[in-house]
Image (tube, rainbow, N blue to C red):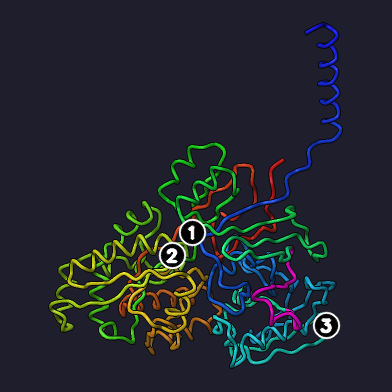
Amino acid sequence: MTFATARRYAFLALAALFLGAANPATARSDLTLAMVLEPPHLDPTAGAAGAIDEIVYANIFEGLTRIGANGEAQPALAKNWDISPDRKTYTFHLHQGVKFHDGAAFDANDVKFSLDRARAPDSTNAQKGLFEAIDQVEVIDPATVKVTLKHPSGDFLYSLGWGDAVIVGRTSAATNKEKPIGTGPFKFQNWAKGSQVALARSSDYWGAKPALDKATFRFIPDPAAASAALLAGDIQAFPSFPAPESVPQFQADPRFKVEIGTTEGETILSENNARPPFDNPKVREAIAHAIDRKAVIDGAMFGFGTQIGSFFPPHHPAYVDLTGERKYDPELAKKLLAEAGYLDGFKTTLKLPPPVYARRGGEIIAAQLRSVGIEAQIILVEWAQWLEQVFKSRDYDLTIISHTEPNDLNIFARDDYYFNYRNPAFKTLIAEISATPDGEKRNALYGEAQKTLSAGAPVAFLMQFPKIGIWDAKLEGLWKNYPIPANDLTAVKWAE
């Protein structure tokens, strides 16, 4: 290379350096993250699947309140509220200038429409119990709504923060399953069935603008594929990673951040209490003693997860450790089965949805049940089948599922819930909890409710599901914990 040529290259390199300094690279503003399950649709007010909220909660749809990263109820579409001395009347003051993504203006009439729709006799809302306390919803003016309760409800503001309680538009509610239209910072862009859902930032958003321009949710149920997609950079985040066996590999890789957090997901072996032999309490007790929870957690989740003895999260201040009430004891399980009239055991079926904890855990539990004389035939079902057959039609014997909704102890008080569990004493406790505003008294009642469930053994309580989050080390703002099944993108950004 001649001196003149070298000087020319040096000049070009120096010019490029100055141009780069004058025109810095645009910060990254897109994100592709992954989920295990594809939702059946995208309307959180018309379905029980947590996968719906994982996409739309706080991103597309908003409620009067919202659940924050630490599990607290915060203002959302309602900027503040007044509560009457008897705690039966809530007056909500709404943000003004808010629009739905189709351009329709949001006001108090949408709040009344949404709450009345959710609690109507023909409502398809999966959590109608959230609205049971509401007596009347009144529009005072376009920016003010008054909600009168039948009785005080200590959880009311928290309940309004669930995905099932988001505010929907009067003209767009009917089509939200396929084309969700909310007031959130992101608007729905497209849904490639079987592959992904894409969101784009809403330019008309009323609140603080998110840093991301675009977010794509990909569906990757296979654990090996999940690891491969992260390592290849095809996705930048898997907030609820399905391959716990691969966690050490990512912890050792500086390109990634690994966050082990908590969820509200009580993972259980559900039993159809209306079907023989599960209508017999001794049979249910036997099953509870036939299961080695630690073996399930170690085998299915590689040690990630916390044993539970009732339907309550260990991180809650009202938690009571009841794991000792149903210790692993195969001989006691056999004795209880004999007392119930099943000396030689019985045959049953175990329907398992796609998540790894269910499929892997199901194999382990089936073997444990077999050792006490219960032959459980494993039937693998897809997510849509599970929702239709098990959750909706209650056509099952046994199944494994993680209930990820927050503060949902009351589902065991619902006569029409898929457990088919009936316990008047428990229903009374739940009613007392709902009507008790004092925190200390409520926690004491929560403790009694946990003990009542443990004694009745309506299901076999397995573990509190962990949140294993893995994402690009330069990504900030994703939740470590899951106080609600949601991937809130409002504060997510790439580090500069």
Horizontal side of residue 42 vs 368, given as left or right: right
Residue situated in front as seen by the camera: 201 or 235: 235
Visible residue check, residue 441:
no
Foreground tag (2 vs 3): 2
Residue at numbered disc 2: 354
Q: Position of residue 237 (x, y in %)?
A: 58, 50
Q: Earlier in the sequence, mark 1 or mark 3?
A: 3
Horizontal side of residue 296 vs 470, given as left or right: left
Q: Earlier in the sequence, mark 1 or mark 2?
A: 1
Q: Earlier in the sequence, mark 2 or mark 3?
A: 3
Q: In terms of image quadrants, where is residue 350? A: bottom left
Q: CA distance from mark 2 to mark 3?
A: 45 Å
Q: Residues within 10 Å of mark 2 (few under 14, many from 20)?
A: some
Quarter containing the C terminus: top right
Residue situated in front as seen by the camera: 341 or 138: 341
CB contact under 8 Å: marks 1 and 2? yes
The residue type indicated by label 1 comes to Pro
The residue type indicated by label 2 comes to Pro
Q: CA distance from mark 1 to mark 3?
A: 44 Å
Residue at numbered disc 1: 221
Q: Position of residue 111 (x, y in %)?
A: 73, 82
Residue at numbered disc 3: 142
Q: In terms of image quadrants, where is residue 27? A: top right
The range drawn in magenta is: 169-185
The single residue placed furthest to the top in the displayed view is 3
Name the residue located 28 percent from the left edge and 71 percent from the top edge. 377
Overall secondary structure of the magenta section: loop
Q: CA distance from mark 1 to mark 2?
A: 7 Å
